[in-house]
Amino acid sequence: MSESSTPAQALTPLRDFITAFSALLDQHPDEARIREEGGSLLAKLVSRDDWLPDAYAQPHPEYYQQMLLHCDSAERFSIVSFVWGPGQRTPIHNHTVWGLIGMLRGAEYSQPFVIDADGTPRPHGEAVRLEPGRVEAVSPAIGDIHRVHNAFDDRVSISIHVYGANIGAVRRHVFPETGGSKSFISGYSNSTLPNPWDRSKDPAAS
Ligand code: FE2
């Protein structure tokens, strides 16, 4: 990386997103407004694909990666890089909190599900294909159960997710196709975070 483009400066879009999302939540918006205005902020973040550090864009050969990029100090929201290896998919799962999914690189499919009276999951409507720049929402209020998979069998796809909690610590559920549910807490695939806060080379730094 050149002198004129330090890592912290490359992360300016992420820092600006964190700042703007915090300011939005400071206004105590209802969830619909978070989805709408927060979704617009996320659409802006994923409108360019030049800021995610390579360390948070690496697939695992067997598992999709859930890399924490930022967690609000009051755990009002968390930002995660979801890195899909070729052909990888999630189980059918829920979130229990609102979530925004912004496609950064490649593409993915999200198939909504509902749970039938006998406890088995049933596809609900068509799968949605997310292309770069597109944002989707999930939440208990609008539909919280889905299965997601990389649209490609031969390349990595990456989406940036924002959730209304420290999502890696939230107890939620997977729904086996045979019925029933299993609780899980996802955790994160990474133990260190990107640093967008070194503004020492920022001309606007005071
Ligand atoms: Fe999900």
Image (tube, rainbow, N blue to C red):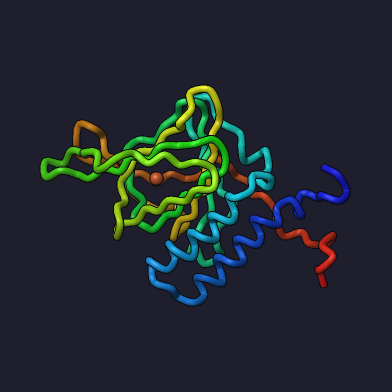
Q: Which of 100 and 128 is in front in this view?
A: 128
Which residue reaches farthest left? 118
Name the residue rendered at 46%, 49% in the picture: 101
Which residue reaches farthest top? 154
Q: In this view, does 128 lie above or below 155?
A: below
Q: Nearer the viewer, residue 147 or 70?
A: 147
The image position of residue 167, as x and y in percent, is 45, 53
Quadrant position of ligand 1: top left
Q: Quick one: quadrant of the C terminus?
A: bottom right
Asked if residue 49 lies left or right of residue 31, the reply is right
The image position of residue 138, as x and y in percent, is 37, 53
The image position of residue 23, as x and y in percent, is 56, 72
Name the residue rendered at 20%, 44% in the picture: 115
Asked if residue 123 lies left or right of residue 9, the reply is left
Asked if residue 89 lies left or right of residue 102, the reply is left
Q: Nearer the viewer, residue 128 or 178?
A: 128
Q: In this view, does 118 lie above or below 39?
A: above
Name the residue rendered at 33%, 43% in the picture: 146
Name the residue rendered at 24%, 43% in the picture: 124
Which residue reaches farthest right? 3
Q: Quick one: quadrant of the N terminus?
A: top right
Q: How many marks?
A: 0
